[in-house]
Amino acid sequence: MILLQASPAGGGFSGIFMIVALIVIFYFFMIRPQQKRQKEIRKFRDGLQKGDNVVTAGGIYGKICEVRPTNIVVEIAQGVKITVDKGSVYPSAADANQAAQQDANASK
């Protein structure tokens, strides 16, 4: 024998509230930080200059020799230069830490 239970009268409202709460949590813990990170990377790539240290997406460290509209020339060893797409370069770890410390000191 199967017994059916009636759902409580306020069940619909609490279900909608939980869905909205989950969406808000996902936004603040996943979507918003990712957008902020992408904005910082875009700002870095727009400000690339000759002499900056970078890391490619493949993990190659080097120094920028020339900046072009869609790509850059990176010197990875003395006399060894490669051309890399701007979308595949990131700040080197040391430079990123130094920039973060400067931003923290400036905001104080």
Image (cartoon, grey):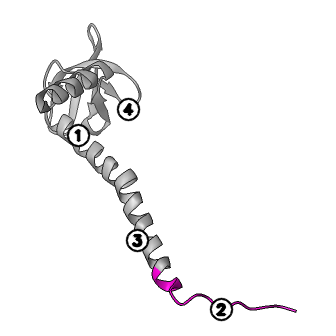
Tag 4 secondary structure: loop
- The CA distance from mark 3 to mark 1 is 29 Å
Q: Helix or strand or loop: what does disc 2 sit on? A: loop
Give the distance between the C-alpha atoms of the residues marked 4 and 2, in whole angstroms: 57 Å
3D distance between C-alphas at marks 3 and 4: 37 Å
User: Circle 4 is placed at which residue position?
Assistant: 57
- On-image quarter of the C terminus: top left
Three-letter residue code for mark 3 = Val
Q: Position of residue 62 (x, y in %)?
A: 29, 18
Q: Which residues are magenta?
A: 1-13
Q: Quadrant of residue 55?
A: top left
| Prevalent SS, magenta region | loop
Q: Which mark is residue 6?
A: 2
Q: Find disc 1 in the rendering and name its residue.
A: 40
Q: Earlier in the sequence, mark 3 or mark 4?
A: 3
Answer whether residue 6 is magenta in the image. Answer: yes
Camera-side residue of 41 and 24: 24
Whole-number angstrom distance, CA of label 3 to CA of label 2: 25 Å
- 35 or 24, which lies in front? 24
Which residue is tagged 3? 20
Percent across and percent down for residue 13 are 45, 82
**Nearest the camera: 36 or 86?**
36
* Relative image position of residue 101 (x, y in whole percent): 22, 24
**Mark 3 touches mark 4? (CB < 8 Å):** no
> Between marks 1 and 4, how big is the CA–CA gap?
16 Å
Residues 7 and 107: in front is: 7
Q: Residue at x 29, y 31 (%)?
A: 90
Task: Please state which of the two labelled residues, at mark 1 or mark 4, is closer to the viewer.
Answer: 1
